[in-house]
Image (cartoon, helix red, strand yellow):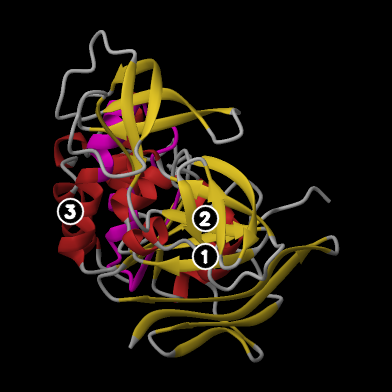
Amino acid sequence: MSTLQIEGVAHAYDGVPVLSGIDLTVARDELVCLVGPSGCGKTTLLRIAAGVEPLQAGSVRIDGRVVAGDGVDVPPERRGVGMVFQDYALFPHLDVLGNVAFGLVGLAPGPRRTRAMEALERVGMAAFAARYPHHLSGGQQQRVGLARALAPRPHILLLDEPFSGLDTQLRMQLRDETLHMLRESGVATVMVTHDPAEAMYMADRIAVMKAGRIVQAGPPEDLYNRPVEDFVASLFGYVNRFAGTVRDGAVATVFGPVAASGFATGSAVDVLIRPEALRLAPEEANDAPPGALAADVVESRYLGRSYLVHLTVEDVAGARHHVHSQIRPSFDLAGRDRVRLWLEDGRAFVFPRETAS
C-alpha cells in the first residue's frame, strides 16, 4: 500500500491555477523527486501534502487514511510528516539538541533527549548538540534540519530543495549521505528539486512537472530514454535539434531518415538527438557504418569521463549543421580536424514541433 496518495489535487492563488489534477503515490522506502522549472507548482504540492497549505480540491491520504479532502483537514503535526525546508528553518534561540527535540511532543524529558540524540547520531551531529545554529556551517545546518525531521519517526519525509544553498562539492557529499540515511530509515520521501541531474541521482521515480501538471512520471531511465514530449527530453540535458516534415512514416535528417511512426505525412516535427547517440570514428576508419558522414571537428572539451566534441556536418542540400557528440573516444582526438560521424539506430526522438503562442 502506498504511504502517500495524492488524488486530483488542484490549487489556485488569487484565481490563477498553480496545480491541475495532480495524482501521485509514494510507497514506503521510495524516494520520488518532483522536478521542473520555477513556478511549476512543486513546492505548493509539497506544502499541501504537509498540511501547511490548505487543500482546495482533491484528496491526500497517508497510510490509507484521509488527511485532507472530503471535509477532513488533519493538522500538520498529526499527519506523521517530517519536512526539511530550503532554508532549514532552525530556531536561532535553541541549541542543536533543542531544535531536534522541539517536535518530540508527548515524550518525557529523558526519552525525548535520547530520541533527539539518536537522530543527531544518525546524521553525524551528536558532537554539536550544544551549539547554536549560527555557529554551524550550511552543511551542518542541513544535517540538523534532517535530524529534526527524522526524530519523530515520520511516515513521510518532504524535502524542499534541501541542497540548493550549498557549494557543488558539499552538495554532492550531503545528497549521498542523505540518500543512505533515507534508505536506512525506510521512510517514504518526496523531494523537490529544480536540478534534473540531482533528481536522476536521488530518485527511485521522478515526476516531471510543467505548468501545474505532472507530464511524465517513472524511473529515471524511463524519463531519459523514453520521454513522452519535447519538454521532458530537453530537461535532462542538451539535445541536438533538427526541424523536419514527416513523409511516409519518416523524417529526413542530415543523418538519414528517422522513423516517425504515428505522424501523418506533412506533419511538422522536431527530431531530438542526445550527444551520446552520435558516434565518432577516425576519418580513415574502415569499420564506420554505411552512411557515416564526414564531419569537421570545431573543438573538443575533456570532461573527465568523456569528451564533448563540437562538430559541423553538411546535409545533401549543402547546408551546414553544428552538432555535439559526447563520447569516450577509442582514438586520440588531439590534432584531428575531421572524423566520421553517425547516429546510432533508434536513438532519436520525434515530437510535434512546438509553435510560439
- Left or right of 280? Residue 44 is right
Of helix, strand and loop, which one carries label 1? loop
Of helix, strand and loop, which one carries label 3? helix
Residue underneath mark 2: 232
Locate the N terminus by quadrant: bottom left
Residue 21 is inside the magenta segment: no
Q: CA distance from mark 2 to mark 3?
A: 28 Å
Where does residue 110 sit, x and y in percent of width and height? 18, 61
Determine whether label 1 and label 3 are within 8 Å by CB: no
Q: Which residue type does callout 3 highlight?
A: His
Mark in the foreground, 2 or 3? 2
Residue underneath mark 3: 180
Of helix, strand and loop, which one carries label 2? helix
Q: CA distance from mark 1 to mark 2?
A: 7 Å
Residue underneath mark 1: 228
Mark 1 / mark 3, whichever is N-terminal: 3
Residue lying at 22% horizontally and 39% vertically, measured from the top left: 129
Comparing 45 with 292, the one in front is: 292
| Location of residue 347 (image quadrant) | bottom left
| Location of residue 42 (image quadrant) | bottom right
Q: Which residues are magenta?
A: 146-175
Instruction: Judge whether residue 139 can be spotted in this image.
Output: no
Q: Is residue 271 above or below residue 213?
A: above
